[in-house]
Amino acid sequence: MTMSMSAAAATSTTTTASVPHLKSATATTQIAAFPTTLSRTSTYAKKPISITCSSTTLQTPPPAAASATDRVFNFAAGPATLPENVLLKAQSELYNWRGCGMSVMEMSHRGKEFLSLIQKAESDLRTLLNIPSEYSVLFLQGGATANSPLSPSISANLTIPLITSSRDLGGTRLTKRLPNTASPNPSGADYPKPANENEVLVADMSSNFCSKPVDVSKFGVIYAGAQKNVGPSGVTIAIIRSDLIGNAQPLTPVMLDYKIHADNNSLYNTPPCYGIYMCGLVFEDLIAQGGLSAVEQKNLKKADILYDAIDGSKGFYRCPVETSVRSLMNVPFTLAKPELEAEFVKEAAKEKMVQLKGHRSVGGMRASIYNAMPLAGVEKLVAFMKDFQARHGG
């Protein structure tokens, strides 16, 4: 299917969910009180600032030890679960990042500390996806909605096949879904890309970004919200072939012009600094696991276990998606007795398995089993499903 860049509608997938918090780790800490004297140079150029402060000691009670038993299995579609080791590392670096004397949340986005973070994150992402040098990697905001393949930022006259999901810019579901999608849509379908190599391929990969190897060279633009597979909400990653940058329509807003962001290395304005830092930690973790080929094998195993449980339930559970296009990331299913679905979600939550309610456009249940969902989470869900079926006449 092809659509002109001048078309008015675009598509993306957005959703929200709660994420449980880890307890903070701190002890007796020296905190500066309100300054008693202050002097600074009045010129705009960067000059040393002299501050004299009195200090006081803030006593905080020691936290309880963090434990895996404190956490739930979060099957939300996004913001989604993050790797526990990544969260613990971020926790340990929260107050004073690697001895620099401040948190990442306090850093200037133009300072050497944050520049080292964003450059390392880009380098690791290029390694994971084997991104060719002729592609720009941008860390943006606005979600997949702002990076729609119908954005005027790429070119005024390109005709491109859409690989996306099922919403327009206003969040209204399209009456007919587009036939090709790289990002599993709310229905749980994951369609293959078109084979026509003479067209510029643009893909919303929000749901399956960094879940498996991808030949980036086959695409003109790839974009993805980070909040499903590679980080917290607030960061959008765009990978754009360089020859597609710089041909924006005249009326394109500055913040939607990829050239502005490429020319400024994603630092045209203040980026979502802490979110980019978290993405960088996730990229490091994915590399440590052996790269995306190893990650894909783990995802295949998790998906097989869950789909086998659904298909082997003798109709008690049903997956509405054709087998050949089932997603490894989002697994929707319904019950033969719809009146039991609310009870299923409620009982699962009591067993520390949360956010299983299906998308409002599909109904039923949906288990999002992104990279960070451990195998133990899927195994626990399957065991619960079998028990629920036994107790309700399956």
Image (tube, grey):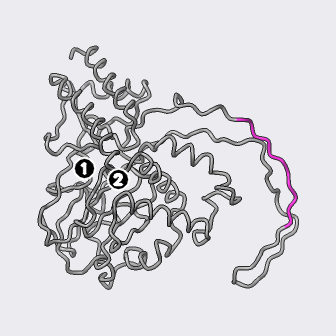
Q: What is the residue that sits farthest to the front in this orientation?
A: 290
Q: Nearer the viewer, residue 387 or 146?
A: 387
Residue drawn where x is 30% and y is 61% of the image: 170
Depicted 21 relative to depicted 194: above or below: above
Query: Label 2 belongs to which residue?
Result: 210
Residue 185's disc number = 1
Residue drawn where x is 69% and y is 83% of the image: 45
Depicted 140 relative to depicted 231: above or below: below
Horizontal arrangement in the rendering, residue 197 relative to residue 376 (left or right): left
Q: Which residues are magenta?
A: 52-62
Q: Position of residue 131 (x, y in %)?
A: 34, 65
Residue drawn where x is 37% and y is 33% of the image: 375
Residue 138 position by quadrant: bottom left
Horizontal arrangement in the rendering, residue 377 relative to residue 21 (left or right): left
Q: Position of residue 101 (x, y in %)?
A: 71, 59
Q: Amino acid at mark 1?
A: Asn
